[in-house]
Amino acid sequence: MALAQLNNPTCSKTQLHSSQLSYLSRNLPKQYNCTFAPLHRTQHGRITCSVAPNQVQAPAVQSQDPKSKPDCYGVFCLTYDLKAEEETKSWKKLINIAVSGAAGMISNHLLFKLASGEVFGPNQPIALKLLGSERSFQALEGVAMELEDSLFPLLREVVISIDPYEVFQDAEWALLIGAKPRGPGVERAALLDINGQIFAEQGKALNAVASRNVKVIVVGNPCNTNALICLKNAPNIPAKNFHALTRLDENRAKCQLALKAGVFYDKVSNMTIWGNHSTTQVPDFLNARIDGLPVKEVIKDQKWLEEEFTEKVQKRGGVLIQKWGRSSAASTSVSIVDAIRSLITPTPEGDWFSTGVSCYYLKHLMYLLDIELYDLLVRFCLHSFLFSGIYLNHSLQLQYQVYTAGNPYGIAEDIVFSMPCRSKGDGDYELVKDVIFDDYLRQKLAKTEAELLAEKKCVAHLTGEGIAVCDLPGDTMLPGEM
């Protein structure tokens, strides 16, 4: 059967059956300006058209032979029949969790929470894939030894490596903690570039070998912009799957409101952290509630809310460093656990949680079994969406992806911005629409938005958007980066 190639300035090599070719040539929108050329016979094909000509494409990497497994550690290299154990213990299918910066202090708290079943549940076996550096590899072996000696029945495998392509192989969760801390005399722009290169490389590795539906939580600072860099370098993974950790800021805000109101933490709900994980972040007391009542009805001191409360949350990380002599580790690991649980557990009715997400969502919507539906798809995309790509999967069915544009808050598109979200517990989420704004909140949102837009320009060379231009509005300190 003859095959053909569909080309345009932003399309990669594609194969389609000849029976589909004439239909596509008649119905493809003119603005794509695609041409057709003969191709050799092949079993699979792919169309990847995009309206974003500067979008980064990760280098093609040969997938590992599934039979050749990376070296695992100690007792975890022994063979075991998990399937037989599933029949007797009702265990779920093993999930792969990758952690970067695995020899650091945050991971030292987090890994044992993951292995104990505290995060994913008492019947969920896991494999931990731990990424370190050459300098930290010996410490990484020590971490693996401790995990080995802890006899966690749910921890079925531990892999340690300095190669992200090994660690991210088939990862279903990627917790990106490792990043260079900011030291004395290091400008914010320099930190953005140094850490941005780390996350660009990790994005490419995720794009090449991770599960197509991997959930990525970026912790390393500056986490919002690092998350943006990572997702831009992983175009084959839904952008909606990338998160910047702002849950620690949410927890800190709840703590301060509870202390002021004289109640316990569990009485505080609907707490949103807007914007960047920096001192421009906006802890939203307008929409938050205490014991079901609006915060402003419980705490009537408007000046305290606008000044002392907001500043305490923004600068809490820096104060902790002054007291403790190091940045937060245990509380950060707890907030990572909270962030994961918020995605795998249904959000309580009427409540929400904060997470830094992209203002564009990349969704896998359906499989198209009939090529004639293609025309309807394209027409639909042109009216409501930005067309991202159509893929021919292994069953020779057409699968398409689209970017849905915008957000309900008027926030600038294509940045990673902390916003209020809800989840059904399936790992996905949706933005909360029933929030209110006043002039004070809008003014604060504009400031943190401007900072993120400036950071985005500063890393343009890492996101495929041209030459970097660094003109940051101010050297706002990131909590914990000193």
Image (spheres, grey):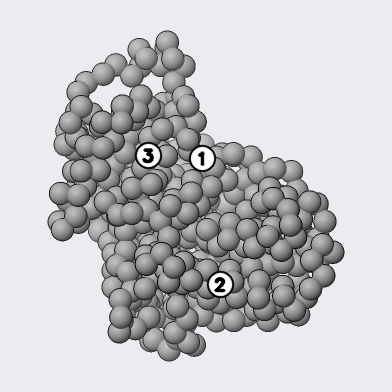
Q: Is mark 3 on a helix, strand or loop?
A: helix
Q: Are marks 1 and 2 in contact (CB under 8 Å)?
A: no
**Residue occupying the point 38% across, 47% down:** 109
Amino acid carrying label 3: it is: Phe
Height in image: 1 above or below 247?
above
Q: Do the residues labelled 3 and 2 touch (CB within 8 Å)?
A: no
Height in image: 41 above or below 35?
above
Question: Which mark's residue is nearer the viewer, 1 or 3?
Answer: 3
Residue 249 drawn at (x, y percent): 55, 62
Q: Nearer the viewer, residue 460 or 373?
A: 460
Q: Which circle's residue, 3 or 2, is located before the other in the chain?
A: 3
Q: Which circle's residue, 1 or 2, is located before the other in the chain?
A: 2
**Which residue bears the numbered disc 2?**
314
Amino acid carrying label 2: it is: Gln
Q: Do the residues labelled 1 and 3 touch (CB within 8 Å)?
A: no
**Which residue bears the numbered disc 3?**
112
Q: Nearer the viewer, residue 147 or 70?
A: 147
Residue 286 drawn at (x, y percent): 75, 67
**Residue occupying the point 28% across, 64% down:** 198
**Which residue bears the numbered disc 1?**
367
Q: Is mark 2 on a helix, strand or loop?
A: helix
Amino acid carrying label 1: it is: Tyr
Question: Image quadrant for the N terminus?
Answer: top left
Question: Image quadrant for the C terminus?
Answer: bottom left
Q: Is mark 1 on a helix, strand or loop?
A: strand
**Residue occupying the point 43% across, 71% down:** 322
Dot 2: few (<14), some (14–19), or many (≥20) neighbours within 10 Å?
many
**Residue occupying the point 47% across, 81% down:** 476
Q: Is residue 53 visible?
A: no
Q: Which circle's residue, 1 or 3, is located before the other in the chain?
A: 3
Dot 3: few (<14), some (14–19), or many (≥20) neighbours within 10 Å?
some
